[in-house]
Image (cartoon, rainbow, N blue to C red):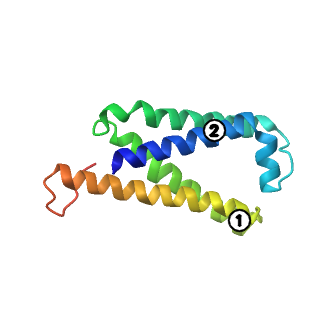
Amino acid sequence: MLRGVVIVSGIYDVLLGGALLFALDEVRQLFGTEPPRFPIHANLNGLFALAVGLGYFAILRNLDANRWYIWIMGPVLKGGGALLFVLDFVWRDSPSLFLAFAASDGVLAAVTAVALVVSSQRSRGGNGVAGPV
C-alpha cells in the first residue's frame, strides 16, 4: 500500500509542477484567476512541486529508510497545504475551485498517514500499537 501511495503522490506532484512551470497560462485560465503579478512565484512553486515529486521516485528503492521523507512531504506538506487552501478560501475569498486542491492534497495526506501507520504496524508484527516511524 505504501509503495502505491508514494507512486501516486510522485505522479501528482510531477504533473502539478510541470503544469505550473510549462502551462501557467492554461492553469490560470482553468481556475479563472488573474495573471500573477510576478509569474516567477508560480514557477518557483512548480519547481518545488516537481522536485518533491521526483523525490518520491528517488526513495522508492528503500521506503523503510526514507519514511521521514514520506511523513514530511505527505501528511505534513500536503496536509498543511490542504489546510491553507481552506483557510485562504474562507479568509481571502480565493476561487472555490481551489478547494479541489484542498480535497486532493487532504486525501493524499490522510491516505499517506494511514499507509505509513499500517506499514509500521506490519513491520513490527501487527500488535496493534504503532511504534516510532
Please state if 128 lies on the left or on the right of 86 as rendered.
left
Q: Which residue is mark 2?
A: 17
C-alpha span from label 1 to label 2: 22 Å
Crowd rating for badge 2 (residues with CA inside 10 Å; few <14, some 14–19, many 20+): many
**Residue placed most toward the observer, 32 or 129:** 32
Residue plotted at (82% across, 42% down):
25
| 55, above or below 124, in the image | above
Q: Residue 118 in the image: state x and y as whole percent.
A: 27, 57
Q: How many marks?
A: 2
Residue plotted at (64% across, 33% down):
47
Q: Which residue is mark 1?
A: 89
Q: Is residue 71 visible?
A: no
**Quarter of the view holding residue 13:** top right
**Quarter of the view holding residue 90:** bottom right
Q: Amino acid at mark 1?
A: Phe
**Residue placed most toward the observer, 120 or 37:** 120
| 31, above or below 39, in the image | below
**Quarter of the view holding residue 26:** top right
Q: Residue 89 in the image: state x and y as whole percent.
A: 71, 65
Query: Which element type, helix, strand or loop, lies under badge 1?
Result: helix
The residue furthest bottom is: 90
Crowd rating for badge 1 (residues with CA inside 10 Å; few <14, some 14–19, many 20+): some
Which mark sits nearer the N-terminus, 1 or 2?
2
Q: Residue 53 in the image: state x and y as whole percent.
A: 52, 37
Residue plotted at (70% across, 59% down):
98
- Residue 21: which numbered mark, if any? none
Residue plotted at (22% across, 58% down):
130
> Tags 1 and 2 in contact by the CB under 8 Å rule?
no
| 121, above or below 24, in the image | below
Please state if 13 lies on the left or on the right of 116 as rendered.
right
Point out the frontmost of discs 1 and 2. Answer: 2
